[in-house]
Amino acid sequence: MSKKIDEFMAKVIERNPSEPEFHQAVREVVESIMPFIEKNQKYQKAKILDRMIEPERVIMFRVPWLDDKGEIQINRGYRIEMNSAIGPYKGGLRFHPSVNLGILKFLAFEQVFKNSLTTLPMGGGKGGSNFDPKGKSDNEVMKFCQSFMTELQRHIGPDTDVPAGDIGVGGREIGFLFGQYKRLRNEFTGVLTGKGLDWGGSLIRPEATGYGCVYFVQEMLKTRGESLKGKVCTVSGSGNVAQYTVEKLTHLGAKAVTLSDSSGFIYDPKGIDEQKLEFVMELKNVKRGRIKEYADEFKCKYFEGKFPWEIKCDVAFPSATQNEIHEGDAKKLVKNGCVAVGEGANMPSTPEAVEIFLDAKILYAPGKASNAGGVATSGLEMSQNSQRLTWTRDEVDEKLLQIMINIHQSCVKYGKDGGSKYVNYVNGANIAGFVKVADAMLDHGVV
Ligand code: NDP
Ligand code: 2IT
C-alpha cells in the first residue's frame, strides 16, 4: 500500500511543483482513502481521486489599489474552485502576506471534504490574496476589498460560488466586499456569508467555528466518559476562531489559559474569563492591537515568538494557522498529559505531530471535522437568505450542535480501527467526506 501511495504522491508533486502544503494535505487524505478505494473498485475505475486533486478551475488576478499616500499598490488575488459535485463552491477568503497558490489549493482541497461532512449541499473552494491588512487604515482595507471584488464578482454568485471569511477577513472586510458586489451587480443576494446581522447575516455565524470545535471535542470526550468541565485548555491564535473557542469553553466550565498572535503567546493560569475575553475582543477586533497588551493589563506571563504548546493542559485547541504544532510540540503535549486536540485551524499539526497523537491514542480531531461548524453555519446563512427568513440564535445554535454531533458520528462510523474501540478520526473524516462527493461524481459521469 505504501508503495502505491508514494507513486501517487510522486505524480502529485511533479504536477504541482513548489506547493508543499498542498502535497501535505493530499497525502493525508490519500493515506486514508487508498485502502478504502482498493476495496471499492468503482472509485478506482472512475479515477475519482485523480480527479479530486485537480481543481475544477483556478482564477488568478491583479488587484491594484491606491494607498493613503496616493501610491499604487499591486496585490495578487485568487479563487480556487475545487469541486462542485455536491453544491456551489463554498469556502473562505484569506488575506495574509503568506498567501500563495499552493496554500489556497491545500485549503480548497480540505474544504471539499469538510463541506461534505457537514451534510449540507456545498462544494469546496477557497480564495484570497497576499494583501496584509495589518497596519492598513480602514480606508486602505476598503480600497483593496473594492478592487478585489471588482474582478472576483464575475466569477461568483449565490448559486455558483459563495465566499466567506478566513484569516484576515472578518466582518469589516465582508462588509466592504458585499457592498462592492451589490453595487456592481445591482443585486442583493447571499453571495457572501458572514454578513452583518442587518444585511442578511446569520446569528451565531461569528461564533460558529469556535463553538463547533468545542462541541466536537465534547463529543470525543463523551466516548471516554469524560466532559470539558474543569479541563485546562490551551488555545492558540486570538482571532475569530480562538475568541469563540475560549467563550464556549468558559460557558462549559473549562479553563482556557493561553492565547497567541504572530508575535507570541500569553499564559494566564487563572483562566481567561468573560471579562478578560471582552478585553481581548476589543483589543483584537476594534483596536487591532497585539496580544502582549493582555499580559500588561492582567499581569501574566508573555512568551515572545512562541506558540503555547509547552504549557501543561488537558485539551489543546490550535486555532491560528497551518503547521503550528510540530513533532516536538506534540511530544510535549502528550508527555504533559493532554488527552484531546481539537483543531480550530486548518491543518495546524504537521504530519509528524499527527503521528505522535495517533500513536499515543489520544482524542485527535483533524480540522476538517472539528472546525466544520463555521462553514456549516455559513450553509445555514445561505438557507436563511434563500428563504428570506432569519432564525433565532437558539435555533441556529441547536442546528450547529446537531451538525457537530452528526459529523462526530460519521467519523466514528468510518474511523473505527478494526475490531478495537479506538477511533481514528483522521481516517473517519477523510473517508466519510470522500464517499458523498465521490458518489455524486460517479453519478455525473466524466466531468
Ligand atoms: P483571524 O484572522 O481572525 O485570526 C488569526 C489568528 O491567528 C491571529 O491571532 C493571528 O495573529 C494568528 N496567526 C495567523 N497566522 C499566523 C502565523 N503565520 N503565525 C502565528 N500566528 C498566526 O483568523 P481566524 O480565527 O478566522 O482563522 C484561524 C484559523 O482557523 C485559520 O487556520 C483558518 O483557516 C481556520 N478556520 C477559520 C474559520 C472561520 O470561520 N473564520 C473556519 C474554519 C477554520 P496575527 O494577528 O498576529 O496575524
Ligand atoms: O476554513 C473554513 O471552513 C472557513 N474559513 C469558513 C468558510 C465558510 O464558507 O464559511
Image (cartoon, rainbow, N blue to C red):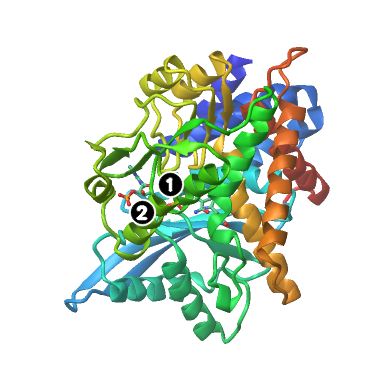
First along the sequence among labels 1 and 2: 1
| 268 left or right of 208 in image | left
Of 2 and 368, nearer the camera is 368
Q: Quadrant of residue 387?
A: bottom right
Q: Which residue is mark 2?
A: 280
**SS at mark 2 in the image:** helix
The relative height of residue 105 versus residue 363 in the rendered view (above or below) is: below
The residue sitting at 35% across, 32% down in the picture is 308
Residue 163 at what x, y percent from top left? 55, 62
Quadrant that contains the N terminus: top right
Residue 273, which numbered label? 1
Q: Position of residue 190 (x, y in %)?
A: 62, 72
Hey, what amino acid is under mark 1? Asp
Q: Tell which tag, 1 or 2, sits nearer the viewer.
A: 1
Tell me the amino acid under the disc marked 2: Val
Q: Is residue 356 left or right of residue 228?
A: left
**Residue 353 coordinates in the image, percent (x, y):** 45, 23
The circle on residue 189 is none
Q: Is residue 74 left or right of residue 389?
A: left
Few, some or many residues within 10 Å of mark 2 (<14, 14–19, 20+): many
70 vs 1, left or right, is left
Q: Please tell me which residue lies in front, 344 or 443.
A: 344
